[in-house]
Image: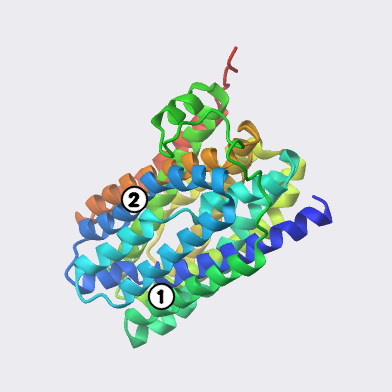
Amino acid sequence: MNSKSKISLLPIFLIVAVDILGLTLVLPILPFYAEHYGASPQAVGFLVTIYALCQLVSGPILGRLSDRTGRKPMLIVSQLGTCLGFILLARSHSLGMIFLSRFIDGITAGNLPIAQAYISDVTEPQDRGKAFGIIGIAFGVGFFIGPGISGYLSQFGYAAPAWAASLLSLISVFCTYFLLPAHVNHESPHAVTDISNSPFNLHLYKKYFANAALGRLLLLYFVFSFSFGNFMSGFALFAERRFLSNGHPLGAREVGYFYTYLGLLAIVSQGYMLPRLLKRFGEEKLVVAGFLTQALGYAAMVLVYQMPVLLVTTLLNSFGSGVLRPALASLISQRAGRHEQGAVMGISQSLISVGQILAPILAGFLIGRHWLNVWVLSTAFFSFCGFWLAIRPVKENA
C-alpha cells in the first residue's frame, strides 16, 4: 500500500475509531442496564435483536444511497442517528425506552458498510486486505479504551457511559464533516449500475448469491457474524453466571475490563500480525485458519471457571475473529464491481444483521435455562461450519 493510500485512510480510521469507542462505552452496560429494569436473559437477547433487525433493513439502503449521493453525507446521517440513540439511552427510565434507543440507532446504522465502501474507493484490490484491517484496528482501539472507561463510569450509574458515548458520536460527526473528503467515490447519478429506483432491492440478494464465489463469501460472512454474535451477546450473562458459581461474580466493571483485553488482542492481531500474514498466506488461507482457531477457542470455553483460563481461550477465538472480518471483507470487495461497493458492503452488513438477530435469541434462550456449556458449544459449532464451508472447493460461474 503506497503512502498516498495510507494518508487517504487516516480520516476514516479516526472516524471509525471514535464511533467504535462510543459503541464500546455502551456495550458492556447494556445487559446490566436492561436487567436493572427487569429484563430476562431472553429480553436482553431481543435488545440486541431489535438493533440488528433495524440494521438489516437500513444497511443495504444506506449503502446504496452512499453509492449515489456520496459516502460523506450518508455517514453523517448515520452518525447523527447513533448520537440520538445514545442520548435516549442515557435518559431511559424504563425497558421500553432502552428498546427505543436501540431501534433509533439500528435504523440509521450505516457507519461500518459506508466506511468499508470508502476504503474500497481509495485502495487497489490487492491492498484491501490490509486496508480493511484498519477497521479491525479501530475496533481494537475502541475496545481497548472504551470498556475500561465504561466500567469506571458505571459506578456513577448506567446513564453515565451512555452520555459519554453520545458526546463521542457528536465528535465523530464533526470529524466526518471536517476531515473526510467529499469526492472519494464516483459520485454521480449514473455511477451505480444495474439498480432500480428503490434503494432496498431484494433482487440484489439474488443477483449476488447467484454468483458462486461471491455467494459463498457472503454466506461465510453470515456464519462468522452468527458465531461472533452468539459469543458477544451471551458473554456478559455467561460470565456473570459461571463466575457466580465460583463465588466471584462478574459485573459491568469486570466485563468492561475483559472487553479492554479483547481490544488489546485486536490491536495486536490486526495491527501487527494481519499485514504479515496476508503477505505470506493471502486472504483465503486466513479465512480457513480464522474459522478453525475461532472454533477451537470457543470450544475450550467449556473449561472456563477461572479468569486465567478465560484469558487463554480468548487468545484463540480473538485471533480467529480478528483475521476473519478483514479477510472476508477484502475478498467480497474484490468480487464486487467498481460501482457496487456500497451496495455489496450494505448486503454484507445486512447479513451480519441477520446473524445478530438470530444469535442473541439463541444465546438468551440457552443461558436463560442455565445451559451454559450448550451455549459455548453452539458458538463453536457454527465456527466449525464456517471452517467446513471455507475448505470446500467452489465452482466458478460459467
Q: Which disc is residue 339 wearing?
A: none
Q: Nearer the viewer, mark 1 or mark 2?
A: 2
At mark 2, the secondary structure is helix
How far separated are the C-alphas under marks 1 and 2?
30 Å
- Specify the label residue 54 is tagged with: 2
Q: Is residue 253 above or below residue 372?
A: below
Please name the residue shown 42% across and 43% down the image.
350
Q: Residue 108 in the image: state x and y as whole percent.
A: 41, 56
Q: Element at badge 1?
A: helix
Residue 343 x, y percent position in the rendering: 52, 39
Q: Which residue bears the numbered disc 1? A: 254
Q: Residue at x 60, y 62 (%)?
A: 138
Q: Residue furthest top?
A: 398
Tell me the kind of residue under disc 1.
Glu
Q: Is residue 34 above or below residue 293?
A: below
Coloration mode: rainbow
Q: Which amino acid type corresponds to the residue marked 2 in the rendered image?
A: Cys
In the image, what residue occupies the spot 79% across and 50% down? Answer: 1
**Residue 52 in the image: x percent, y percent?**
36, 51
Which quarter of the picture shows residue 263?
Answer: bottom right
Asked whether residue 366 is in view, the answer is yes
**In this view of the protein, which residue sits in the foreground, 120 or 274?**
120
Q: Quadrant of the C terminus?
A: top right
Mark 2 surroundings within 10 Å by alpha-carbon count, few (fewer than 14), some (14 through 19), many (20 or more)? many
